[in-house]
Amino acid sequence: MATEASSFENLGYELHRFLGPGEIVLLSTDGVKLLKPEGSRKNICSFLWIYTGSPSSIYDGISVESTRERCGRYLARRDNVKADFVAGVPDSGVGHAVGYAMESGIPYRRPLVKYTPGYGRSYTPPTQEIRDLVATMKLVAVRDVINGNRMIICDDSIVRGTQLKNLTVKKLWDNGAKEIHIRPACPPLMFPCIYASSTRTTAELACRKAMRALEGKDIEDPSEYLDTTSSKHANMIDWIRRDLNVTSLKYMTIEDMIAAIGLPARQLCLHCWLGK
Ligand code: SF4
């Protein structure tokens, strides 16, 4: 039994079936014994498909990599920016960028490559200092690809924004980028994970930093900023764009993200974006 279906592949096992919500089974040499049948309520973490899951994994029968490609396609359909190439921030932005390239016809290129394939996930270490060090070391710019070009950069999400700004974007400008258009494959993250897995505190989120700067204080109720048609929402996105120092910034809509995953919204956890 495993949470990552891809862990079976190289061990020679086959995927038998997915457990349901709340379901408990006992594995023994006698076989599989059902101890508790699955419940009726299911709320799977959407972030598994967008960011935290391995591209080779499958959750509830839905492939992570294929979902990311669909995210990229949705991003491209709502975009009209002119660019010389599309790229993904390695590794979790790559699938999204491949989908964007397939849908738009804009070539996929690699302005940033990983120093060591499999270098640790930079969000995992407990302190910001170690997270920054891992992030600094793991990406190397390819100047010949970057210099003089306009680029669409797909990333899975913007959590704090500090690594994207200080490392990825800076490396691209330092190597002669002409335009940088950032396309996160999910809506703005407004709330920390209720299980403290992917994001830890409200204050660290880029959106909250933007709100604090725009309002001059922390605000209790962010509902006006959640409304994607409001001027407050637009101001928040533009504040993040300026803070990241990029040419343009356009997030994925929640409707497109849900459609890309392919499960009904009621079966997904969307707390990071909606607070519920
Ligand atoms: S709060 Fe966010 S990261 Fe946590 S389980 Fe829900 S969608 Fe996933």
Image (spheres, grey):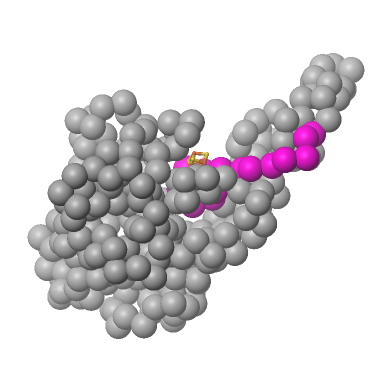
**Residue 87 visible to an observer of this rendering:** no
Q: Which residue is painted at 61% across and 48% down in the image?
A: 268
**On the picture, is 133 further left or further right than 85?**
left
**Residue 61 visible to an observer of this rendering:** yes
Q: Which residue is painted at 78% across and 35% down in the image?
A: 39
Query: Is residue 212 shown above or below 258?
Result: above
Q: Which residue is painted at 32% across and 74% down in the image?
A: 85
Residue 129: x, y in percent?
Answer: 19, 30
Splitting the image into 4 quarters, where does residue 44 fall? top right
Q: Of residues 58 and 13, which is closer to you in this image?
A: 58
Q: Of residues 156 and 23, which is closer to you in this image?
A: 23
Q: Of residues 39 and 31, which is closer to you in this image?
A: 39
Taking the view exactly as shown, the residue that stands out farthest to the right is 30
Residue 24: x, y in percent?
Answer: 77, 25
Residue 153: x, y in percent?
Answer: 31, 64
Residue 152: x, y in percent?
Answer: 31, 70
If the image is split into quadrants, where does the N terminus sit?
Answer: top right
Stretch in magenta: 38-53
- In the rendered picture of this protein, how many numbered marks are placed on residues? 0
Query: Is residue 32 shown above or below 123?
Result: above
On whether residue 44 falls in the magenta region, the answer is: yes
**On the picture, is 71 further left or further right than 114?**
right
Taking the view exactly as shown, the residue that stands out farthest to the top is 29
Q: Of residues 213 and 10, which is closer to you in this image?
A: 213
Splitting the image into 4 quarters, where does residue 45 fall? top right
Q: Which residue is painted at 12% across and 68% down in the image?
A: 176
On whether residue 165 falls in the magenta region, the answer is: no
Splitting the image into 4 quarters, where does residue 38 fall? top right
